[in-house]
Image: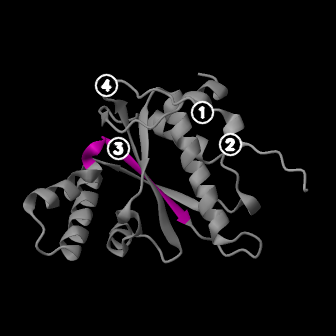
């Protein structure tokens, strides 16, 4: 698939099944991520790869957060939280790693990590994989950060779920670039 076709046709694929991407595919995904724009060449990111046991352990962390926030949580709701990471055979967690720099604020480093995630999603699409970027409340939870071993200068930008599309892909929405562009002349 050529680059423009991948860019014009990518959609999120929320329903995923196995098998997980191969080690070679993971390498290609990360190579694409590492090409993100990066002011001052800081490489302000790192990635965690989770499969099987890692996904189950993350589900345990999600369950601990749910229990802490709602001590009388029902067993069904608790099981839902614990099962969230198991919606795909693989997850890559993108972590912004803030590097002190006088010309590159943390917000710009977060955006660089987000572009790395976008590149990873495009690469997954180009290889025929299914992928979806999720974050939500768990991405900001200190218990999750501690459980994953994040440092104080790190934060989760994305939980990227990866696998094979389960069923058809949703249609690519028709968007008109002119609806999002305004020519500014300074007047």
Q: Secondary structure at mark 1?
A: loop
Q: How many residues crowd mark 1 within 10 Å: few (<14), some (14–19), many (20+)?
A: few
Q: How many residues crowd mark 2 within 10 Å: few (<14), some (14–19), many (20+)?
A: few
Q: Percent from the top left, x then y, of residue 140? A: 41, 69
User: Which is more toward the observer, 170 or 157?
Assistant: 170
Q: Quadrant of the N terminus?
A: top right
Question: What residue sits right under mark 3 in the picture?
Answer: 90
Q: Quadrant of the C terminus?
A: bottom right
Question: What residue sits right under mark 4 in the picture?
Answer: 167
- Front of the two marks 4 and 1: 1
Q: Indicate which disc, 3 or 4, sits on the residue closer to the N terminus.
A: 3
- Front of the two marks 2 and 3: 2
Tell me where the magenta segment starts and ends, as one range. 86-96
Give how far apart the Cα atoms at labels 3 and 4 are.
Answer: 18 Å
Q: How many residues crowd mark 3 within 10 Å: few (<14), some (14–19), many (20+)?
A: many
| Residue pictured at 36% horizontal, 64% vertical | 137
Give how far apart the Cα atoms at labels 4 and 2 are.
Answer: 32 Å
Q: Percent from the top left, x then y, of residue 19? A: 31, 31
**Residue 90 sits inside the magenta stretch:** yes
User: Which is more toward the observer, 138 or 60?
Assistant: 138
Q: Is residue 11 above or below residue 139?
A: above
Q: Indicate which disc, 4 or 2, sits on the residue closer to the N terminus.
A: 4
Q: Secondary structure at mark 4?
A: loop
Question: What residue sits right under mark 2 in the picture?
Answer: 180
Q: Secondary structure at mark 3?
A: strand
| Residue pictured at 62% horizontal, 48% vertical | 34
Question: What residue sits right under mark 1 in the picture?
Answer: 175
């Amino acid at each position: 698939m050529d680059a423009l076709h991948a860019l014009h046709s990518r959609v999120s694929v929320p329903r995923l099944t196995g098998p997980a991407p191969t080690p070679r595919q993971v390498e290609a995904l990360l190579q694409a991520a590492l090409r993100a724009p990066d002011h001052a060449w800081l490489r302000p990111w790192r990635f965690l790869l989770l499969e099987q046991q890692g996904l189950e352990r993350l589900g345990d962390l999600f369950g601990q957060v749910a229990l802490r926030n709602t001590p009388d949580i029902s067993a069904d709701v608790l099981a839902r939280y614990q099962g969230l990471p198991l919606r795909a055979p693989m997850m890559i967690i993108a972590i912004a790693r803030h590097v002190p720099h006088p010309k590159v604020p943390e917000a710009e480093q977060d955006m660089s990590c987000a572009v790395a995630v976008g590149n990873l999603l495009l690469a997954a699409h180009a290889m025929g994989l299914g992928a979806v970027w999720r974050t939500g409340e768990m991405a900001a939870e200190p218990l999750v950060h501690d459980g994953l071993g994040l440092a104080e200068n790190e934060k989760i930008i994305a939980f990227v779920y990866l696998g094979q599309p389960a069923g058809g892909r949703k249609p690519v929405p028709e968007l008109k670039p002119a609806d999002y562009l305004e020519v500014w002349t300074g007047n």
